[in-house]
Amino acid sequence: MIDLSISDSGDVGKLVLSGSIGIQHAAQLKESLLEGISAAKQLVLNVSDLERADLAVIQLIFAAHRSLADKGKTLSIDGKISEAWHTAVKDSGYVGCLNTNDNNGLWTGEGK
Amino acid sequence: MSVEIDTSAFTEEAYELLSELEASLLELEESPDDQDLIGRVFRAMHTIKGSGAMFGFDEVAEFTHEVETIFDMARNKTISVSKTLIDLTLAARDQIRSMLDAAAGGEPADKNNAQKIIQGLRALAPGAGGAPKDSGGGSAKKPPAQASVDEPHVYRVRIKPNQDIFANGTNPLLLLGELRDIGEDCQIIAQYEGLPPLEKLDPEQCYTSWEVFLTTKQSENAIRDVFIFVDDQCELNIRLLDREEVLGNDVQKLGNILVQRGDIKEEVLEQALKPIGDRLVESGVVSSSQVKAALAEQNAIKAKRDKKVQAESATSVRVPSEKLDGLVDLVGELVTVQARLNQTASTRQDHDLQLIAEEVERLTGELRDNTMSIRMLAIGTTFNKFKRLVRDLSTELGKQIEMTTEGADTELDKTVIDQLNDPLVHIIRNSIDHGIETPDVRIAHGKNPQGLVHLSAIHSGASVLIRVEDDGKGLDPNALTRKAIEKGHLPPDAQLTDKEAFMLIFGAGFSMAEKITNVSGRGVGMDVVRRSIDALRGSIEVASELGKGTTITLKLPLTLAIIEGLLVKVADELFVLPLAAVEECVELSRTDIANAHNRHVINVRDEIVPYIRIRDRFDIPGEAPEIEQIVISDVDSKRTGFVVDSVIGQHQTVIKSLGKNFEHSEEFSGATILGDGTVALILDLSKMVRYVEAEEEDLSESVAA
């Protein structure tokens, strides 16, 4: 499930990904990401209940994270990063893709 | 086009490895938990398999693979080392040997036997019955068995899927997962440079490509098989990274790899790689002279290190033995020429020439000793073979026998070692079959049920003594004499000393065995021993105590190429007697001959010593001098004299064979060329004595008849 909520103040956009997310949700995920980035000053991602993600999801989150980093913004993480996310990062070879900009361990491929 | 490959290097190495393997297996039987030994067995198998495949010995490689697989399990402690495993692996070792022999033109190896061994080994695997080990995996598309290769290799696999690959329902992550499954190590690195900014990104397109570094025992084909269903949907490029030519050199530098992969241009690399010295000078941190000094220091250390590496890598060289034979021949020629030079120098009374001759003599001596030492091998490898023999025979005969060895590092000429194998096999077989009793008999005699065979080697002057001792029932000299009389080998009234009686076991067709076994009892073996030891210019001595055991000692010369001899003269003829056998020289006057009533014996310090007159033996014409010389020698443990006109002295004798035309002249073991170019014949003392004894026996029989 993809759930985007923007705080009342409009400062924080919170995107929650839960369950199994894949190519069939890709279009929706892109929209949510674009909306979250443009509408809120800060984007918070919660993947604590994510059970499965595929390459399409990884590509989208990476593209979003990279745009934020390019703009000097951060992608904050809410809650624990689920094992499913780490596995997807590892399996797709995206480990370490954001180098020093990965300040919350989203792309390490392993739990802290 | 066919390429001729020299396989001798492989077979030579494989034979050595098989010997090592046998020794390791026998040790492993004693200590089955020794991981080092298990590792040694595994490595030996692994090397035979690897180089076998490389040299085209596919049958050997495939067979060895099966054995290696089981030992890999033992190494990983999946199975334990049992007697069955040792038995089967020893049998496998023999099978590999037969395969190698067959490849060298010998009898074809028994394929059924190979199959039996493989089945036996597979049955040891946990959950036996099927193919062991590689049946796991989890990939539905299991690559065929032949696709697998021996050593794990590192491959770089570049995968670039078409952008629309998701549309076909393909999940690239599953393919990457399959790749991971066939590898021992798999590093997946995503290439996401083509990924557009989020706004422009089509969420249903694949923008990622990968570089995968896969370490696997599987072949390139097995890797391709993973992508078999998507080969039209992606670009696939596989490259073997650890090829010999790559491994042979230094690991490639990062910059070169980047240029090779097309990631950067060469000019960029050159700029980036400007020597650190230049860059530091440019930035004004150091002066160019400081850099030069530092560079000089670096070069000096490098040169030193290179020398050290070179020295370490050249500690041993493998040379075919024919080359060594050639070298020994040349040294032999040189020794002969040097003797001539000495003689010429002393005849001419030329002081300068004498000095040179002395110098050449010293160098020749050193060269000879060095050359001989190159041919020297430790007898240990031969000893190890016998451990196997003892193990197999004791099982076959239901006896418990322990074999111990001593002096395995004693060195002997390679030729001697090669020719020593058969006689030792016969002696040890006899010890086991006739000497050592069965456990119940041994217990009844108050002995340890486990018999002992002790094999030892020790240097003794210019000879090596090889002893085979057993603690079996020993030899009965009276029974031996009786048997010899019964068989007609001895006259009915023969009186022999114990020593002489023991030597009867080496007579042709003589056997004390009541029944003929696979092992011995045909009376052939020990006769072979005597002939082989004769051929090696050695001698045999037997000591035995009834009920306690027997010791057979072989006395062998260190080398067969050059010996120390005693040069003697009869009329104008020169002969050489092996100095190792010579004990003393005494005079023989006409009075002595008269006192002995013309019988060929002399009293030497109250001991009656028989002698052979060389002049008579070889029909040399002319009158013997008033006082002759008897060279008393030890021949087959008996003192025997050889009468000559005069003793010239010690002579370094380079042995030359007499050639085919004289191969029936058995009383000579060869010839040597003296300094003045004349030829002296080398006497085979043992054979001479035997011929004379046989002739005298014939004579006394014809007189009696």
Image (tube, coloured by chain):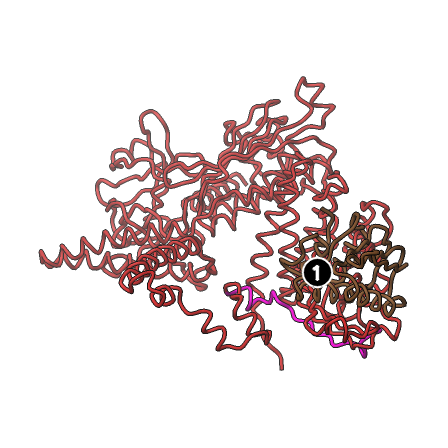
Chain colours: A brown, B red
A102 vs B248, nearest the viewer: A102
Say which element carries label 1: strand
Vertical comparison of B343 with B640: above or below: below
B358 vs B302, nearest the viewer: B302
Kindly identify which residue carries mark 1: B216
Q: As drawn, which residue projects farthest toward the bottom? A: B1
Vertical comparison of B435 with B163: above or below: above
For residue B56, which quarter of the picture?
bottom right
Horizontal side, residue A33 vs residue B298: left or right: right
Horizontal side, residue A80 vs residue B334: left or right: right
Q: Give the range drawn in magenta.
A: B229-249
Image quadrant in which the N terminus of chain A is located: bottom right
Q: Where is residue B221 in the image (x, y as percent from the top left)?
A: 75, 70
Q: Can residue B349 be seen in this view?
A: no
Residue sitting at x 69%, y 57%: B185
Membership of B96 in magenta stretch: no
